[in-house]
Amino acid sequence: MVIAIIAILASMLLPALSKAKAKAQQTACLNNLKQIALATRLYAGDHEDWLPPIQAQLPTGNGESTWRAHLYRYVGNTARIYDCPTEKVEVYASAKPPGLNRKPSPWVLGQFTPGEIDIPSGIGAVNVHWMFGGAQPPFGRPAGYENNQCRETMIEAPSLLLLVGDGHSDVFGVWPQDRWWIWKETGGANSVGFNRLAQGDKGAVRHNRRSNYARADGSAGLLDPARIPCDTNACWWSAKNDPH
Ligand SMILES: [Zn+2]
Ligand SMILES: [Zn+2]
């Protein structure tokens, strides 16, 4: 009798506990995104309104940097800000490059150092509409790449534009070492209808079929991937309301 009651109580308690844990992880992730949003604004303030590049050549010419190094001092030199607590494989703070038996290299985290670009992140920068001559995505690239870096003054709706979000964007293994973007796998870069759900992006459904995003006005929120507009009325992935 007692055992039966304990079993019933446990069966009631465990789902509640796992639900509470999932909610705590989602909130921690949202806080990370909020800090990245604020860091991006601070960076822009120090760089004549320019947002950081998603990727650029190192000044020494022996490799490339990512947005994470550019924002590192603005997130208090804290690697785990670039991670979602629910993501167990693509973990920036682990400093582990992808592949079996790869040794962690913690000295590259947040640094303009060869190898930093290889470390995957649980949070990705938005680089959906990345085409040459197209509208700026929030995290573009400098001259030598698409030359489409974004400036705060180009952003038409800062309260809607998504800067970064829960990432696991290397959906088809095309670029296995670039796991720190949210990007478009299919269709022309400026075509309408980008949908992470349709793309099968695990990062988009990480928190109970939703995921966290930070916006250009410094806010952050939990969004349903089926309800993020990318059409000629509105596009939350581009500095322009209609980049299509
Ligand atoms: Zn998350
Ligand atoms: Zn769009």
Image: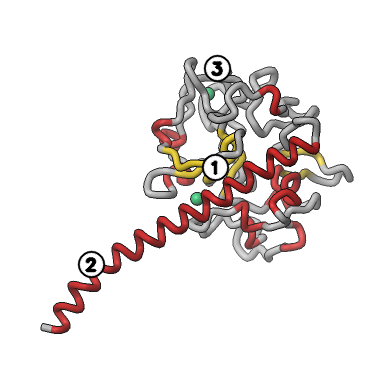
Gap in angstroms between the C-alphas marked 1 and 3: 21 Å
Residue 79: quadrant of the picture: bottom right
Residue 156, percent from left and from top: 61, 21
Identify residue for label 3. Answer: 242
Please, which residue is most extreme toward the left here?
1
Q: Earlier in the sequence, mark 2 or mark 1?
A: 2
Q: Earlier in the sequence, mark 2 or mark 3?
A: 2
Residue for point 23% across, 69% down: 11
Q: Which mark is residue 12?
A: 2
Q: Label 3 CB, ligand 2: below 8 Å?
A: yes
Q: Which mark is residue 165?
A: 1
Gap in angstroms between the C-alphas marked 2 and 1: 33 Å
Q: Quadrant of the C terminus?
A: top right
Q: Is residue 63 left or right of residue 21?
A: right
Q: Quadrant of the N terminus?
A: bottom left
**Nearest to the observer: residue 118 or residue 32:** 32
Q: Residues within 10 Å of mark 1 (few under 14, many from 20)?
A: many
Nearer the observer, disc 2 or disc 3? 2
**Nearest to the observer: residue 33 or residue 118:** 33
